[in-house]
Image: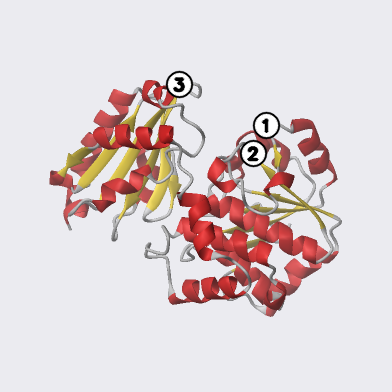
Amino acid sequence: MLYYRIFARMNSADVAKVWELLSQSNNILIVPHKNPDGDAIGSTLGLFHFLKLLGKTAQVIVPNDYPKFLKWMPGTDGILNFEKHNTQAQEYLAKTDLIFTLDFNHLSRTGQMEQFLEGSNAKFVMIDHHQQPDDYAVVTYSDVSMSSTCEMVYNTIEAFGESERITPEIATCLYTGIMTDTGSFKFSSTTSRTHRVVAELIDKGAQNMWIHQQVFDTNSPARLHLLGTALKNLTILNTYRTAYITLSQEELDRHQYGKGDTEGFVNYGLTLEHIIFAAIFIENKEEGIIKISFRSMGNFSVNEFARAHFNGGGHTNAAGGRSTSSMDETVQRFERLLKEYKNQLLA
């Protein structure tokens, strides 16, 4: 198979190739990663609405459920959940001739869907901003400097010469993903170009204040109590400019944990003066793992740290990982590793 690679400034040949694939396709599938976040849902729905605008038959299938604070987005009621709607999802997969994979760089990030995607005869297009993309796609649009996959979807629409046709629904979805993946526009990946794209999306109908309220101002009392527990569990290691949080399964159960309830908790560590490395360790007894999120400021690469030690990866300043050891063993290992990285953390 011939592979193509396209970047933020796509040349005419690359754009033509994607357009050709679209013109030849009757049933298009759009897939985000497992445990999809705002960027994953925003980019898939944004692309979905754009393809419908072109008169294409398209379907978004998520590997599993996603947080309640994203379920207000236009088009979310038509999303298929592979775990809950398995038969219907597999039926659509079987007739799909083109698959867009958004916001992930390897099919293993789709959980149970991986084997079905690998067995598909459809052609793939990848749009993603994570490091070290795999080569399964016919066309890969990969740029790790991008703020979000949603910004990349906007770039794709613009490259097609179709940005003037962006609807309020598309604008809302893309704005949501850019906003959430940039930490409300405060991360270093937020460029002047990002702000210009956001301005265009607002002009196209994205109601920025309302979107912020839907995502951030719909907390339940249980979630705020869980946040209180997380902050009570905060450990600060000034010697390594590091802070971390732990949450046990018992603590999650006590506060009626729902998917997405711990979103953003890890960032609280970075609000501390002098801290540049933050982590959260969350016990998941059902899967038998400790789920880990890492965040950093400056040049310390949590992507490299997660890849080297915790079976994960992501971006330079935001990554995830996992451990099959107990909580105590995982945290003790984390603290031991900090000694190896002390020079980098204090640089």
Residue 168 is situated, as x and y percent measured from the top left of the image, at: 66, 66
Q: Which amino acid does label 1 sit on?
A: Glu
Residue 167 left/right relative to 303: right
How many residues crowd mark 1 within 10 Å: few (<14), some (14–19), many (20+)?
some
Q: Quadrant of residue 250?
A: top left
Q: What element carries label 1?
A: loop
Distance from disc 2 to disc 3, alpha carbons, whole Å, reads: 20 Å
Q: Do the residues labelled 1 and 3 touch (CB within 8 Å)?
A: no
Q: In which quadrant of the rendered image does the N terminus lie? A: bottom right
Task: Give the Cα separation between the discs numbered 2 and 1.
Answer: 7 Å
| Type of the residue with mark 3 | Lys
The crowding category of the residue bearing disc 2, from other C-alpha atoms within 10 Å (few below 14, some 14 to 19, many at least 20), is: many
Question: Earlier along the polypeptide chain: callout 2 or callout 1?
Answer: 2
The residue shown at (57%, 47%) is: 70
Measuring 35% from the left and 44% from the top, which residue is drawn there? 266
Is 9 above or below relative to 104? below
Q: Residue 83 carries which label?
A: 1
Q: Residue at x 25, y 33 (%)?
A: 232
- Percent position of residue 262, x then y: 42, 38
Q: Which mark is residue 63?
A: 2
**First along the sequence among labels 1 and 3:** 1
Tag shown at residue 285: 3
The alpha-carbon separation of the residues under discs 1 and 3 comes to: 19 Å
Looking at the figure, which quarter contains the C terminus?
bottom left
